[in-house]
Image (cartoon, rainbow, N blue to C red):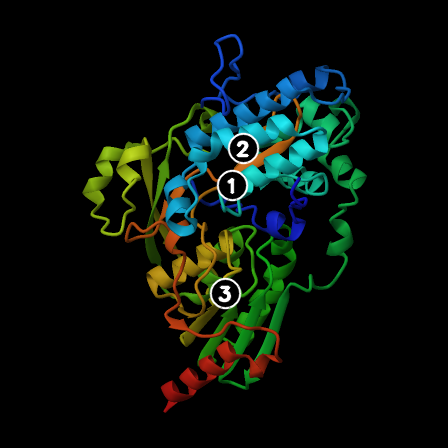
Amino acid sequence: MRPTIVSLVVVSAVALLLLVSCNSGDLPGKKQSESEQVQASPVAPVVSSKVAEEQSEVALTPLTVEQRLEDFDYMWNIIEENYPFFEVNKRLNGEDWLANKEEYRNKIAAVKTDDEFLEEMTFVLSRLNNGHTAFISKEEYPWYLYIYTRLGYGFEPWVNVFKQPNVLARYNQKPLNEQTSSDEINKNNNMVEEEGERKETSGNVEKVIIEPDQIAYLGMRSFGGHLMEMDSAEIRDFLKQVKDFKTLILDIRGNGGGSSDYWRIHIVPQLINKPITYNTYYLYRGGDYAEAFMQARQLTEGLQPIANIKDEQLPEMPPEANKIFKNYNKKVDIVTPYQSVGFKGKIYLLVDRSVYSSSEGLAAFAKGTGFATVVGEKTGGDGLGTDPLVVALSNSGYLFRFSLQMGLNSDGSCNEEVKTVPDIEVDPDKSKPLLDQPAIMKVLELASSKGK
């Protein structure tokens, strides 16, 4: 058995991709007879909250071999019919995931315990090489449930999956009839957000006046939705303070994402003086499982047959776009000034390979619109789209999530594949003191030459 693959809260949680503003198989091994084949439906086992509350707590018993294989096939069917990045994975990583089904299934059949089953299933999903596609750990479970519950309208399918009785049992949660509110869920899992709100600042924002009246620095370690309310006043006060500076450095190196509203509401609108229009495209496989989630998030509105995308004149569109996708929608994103501080100077955005999800969304926006000059190294990608879908395995109750759509940049290139290539490539290392970091030194050099 290979070493256990751990899903880190730091990586997975911050890469939630809460782009809330975007409205935008056969069994491996020997062939089996019809009676042996899994009859699992590819449609989501979404249980309504009312029904779930009426069900008693599910007692966990060790999974049988048949149950593990059923769960494997259920997962496989959903991924095969809905996942958007199979061909990207081939091109970037040389990984033909679908071709390995029999190998993976045989390994699932050989595991002896539920823990080994989860370990092996985690490995299978890891071979898709996508940061939004992974199993959810027991440590992560309460964080996700709290966030989805707090988001409320439009996220009912996510919440309902998390609250299925077999999921509650697997993740050691109280049965629903004993959970009175999202506040209690939060309290029971040591996630009382008010603890952080008592602080004057979140500690997420770093502000530096590098050169008085000339160069200012604003760094954000995360775009976590839970940080927005606290960070917004701090960010605004600083932007008002430096509004007449010549140069502003925005640093999102190491920022794995969170909510796109962080930058769409609290950063960009305050720094622009006229609307910015940015076109992006979202391609969908058309699998049945995604339907309820897409309807809840109003993603089915404006869907067009994939054949119509030829009229968009997208020169860099990936070759599989017209082959494996069923439909798409176009999002015309207009970011307008809101409480603009009147900044008229030059903006530099520092990025690195850890920039992912909604922070990648800012990098792609900056590069695509010229909002800022992007400096550093190629980013992590997958920053265009909505929240990953969540799935509960029917027998085990284990949860996993996966990317729903392929987001295309304004030129048609796949954001997950090409990511964001900086305007100026430079070592993004942050280990040295701020003014000794290569990216900062490069910006200071550019700012100095610009001022001459």
Please rate how many residues cluster around mark 3, counting C-alpha atoms within 10 Å: few if below 14, some from 14 to 19, many from 20. Answer: many
User: Disc number at residue 104?
Assistant: 2
Residue 353 or residue 307, whichever sits in front: 353
Residue at 20%, 41% in the rendered image: 310
**Callout 3 secondary element:** loop
Q: Is residue 101 left or right of residue 209?
A: left
Q: Identify the residue position indicated by label 1 in the image.
A: 387
CA separation in Å, label 3 and label 1: 22 Å
Q: Identify the residue position indicated by label 3 in the image.
A: 352
Where residue 428 appears, x then y in whole percent? 51, 72
Q: Is residue 200 left or right of residue 283?
A: right
Residue 355 or residue 278, whichever sits in front: 355
Q: Nearer the viewer, mark 3 or mark 1?
A: 3
CA separation in Å, label 2 and label 1: 27 Å
Please rate how many residues cluster around mark 2, counting C-alpha atoms within 10 Å: few if below 14, some from 14 to 19, many from 20. Answer: many
Q: The residue under label 1 is which amino acid type?
A: Asp
